[in-house]
Image (cartoon, rainbow, N blue to C red):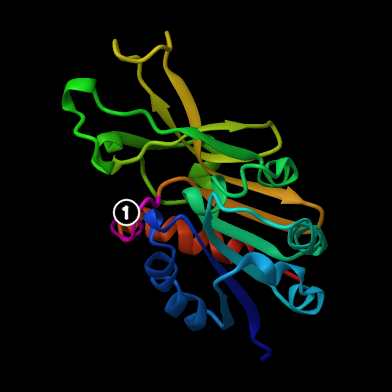
Amino acid sequence: MTSRRALVVRGGWDGHKPVEATELFLPFLRDNGFDVTVSETNDVYADADLMAATDLIVQSVTMSEISREAFAGLRDAVRAGTGLAGWHGGIADSYRKESDYLHLIGGQFATHPSKAPEECGAGESDNFLPYTVEMTELGRTHEITTGIADFSLDTEQYWVLHDDLIDVLATTTHPVQPYHPWHRPVTSPAVWTRHWGDGRIFVATPGHSPEVLADPNVRTIVERGMLWAARTA
């Protein structure tokens, strides 16, 4: 049986621990028959031969930049059938200056609301809030999320700007608070998939840290999402 190939691309802002986070999933990928290559730079996307031979890209690159050549390689590979998967800022907050990347992914991090001002102390936990990830009707039957009930986390709750071409498997709702300027609850996608040409894209917004990724619900969703996204033919 021929092994499939996975390319793990990591880097960008170190606050999301891209090395430690991706290392959590390397044994899973290998156990599921992938030969895994790890790259510390997205320049690898410009390698046309490597990309053509890659069945799954797992990206963990928050913010950062991407060259036109590298982005074209990523875009063309996905369109041709290479799967793309990731979590949190490593996929939903990558390459902010590249509008075509945002178009590819279908959803972009906008903010993560904070606690009340009097509870904030200028640390990353200022943005850790208790919230619920709620399955959609599609999510209750989709192979990525089937059997997973709504669950709670205490971490960054992503507010995502998105288009209508994503298939939303789970959502999270930002409540109205007196210290925030919005006037009604806002629901954002928390887990989604997207078909792009012959390729599949999977995004989960939970995953701020390895500890969040170790949550059984989050880890199961990410693992299933990677397998779903991988090239099928």
Residue 26 percent location from the top left of the image:
46, 76
The amino acid pointed to by label 1 is: Val
Determine the secondary structure under disc 1: helix
Does the magenta-highlighted stretch encompass residue 209?
Answer: yes
Q: Is residue 97 visible?
A: yes
Residue sitting at x 57%, y 53%: 64
The residue indicated by pointer 1 is 212
Total numbered circles? 1
Residue farthest along the bottom direction in this orientation: 1
Eyeballing the image, is 215 above or below 98? below
Does the magenta-highlighted stretch encompass residue 90?
Answer: no
Residue sitting at x 37%, y 50%: 208
**In the image: residue 136, left or right of residue 116:** right
Q: Residues within 10 Å of mark 1 (few under 14, many from 20)?
A: some
Residue 113 percent location from the top left of the image:
36, 28
Q: Quadrant of the C terminus?
A: bottom right
Residue range corresponding to the magenta coloring: 207-213
Foreground residue, 39 or 22?
39
Q: Quadrant of the N terminus?
A: bottom right
Residue 195 percent location from the top left of the image:
73, 50
Eyeballing the image, is 138 above or below 187? below
Residue sitting at x 23%, y 22%: 116
The answer to which image quadrant residue 34 occupies is: bottom right
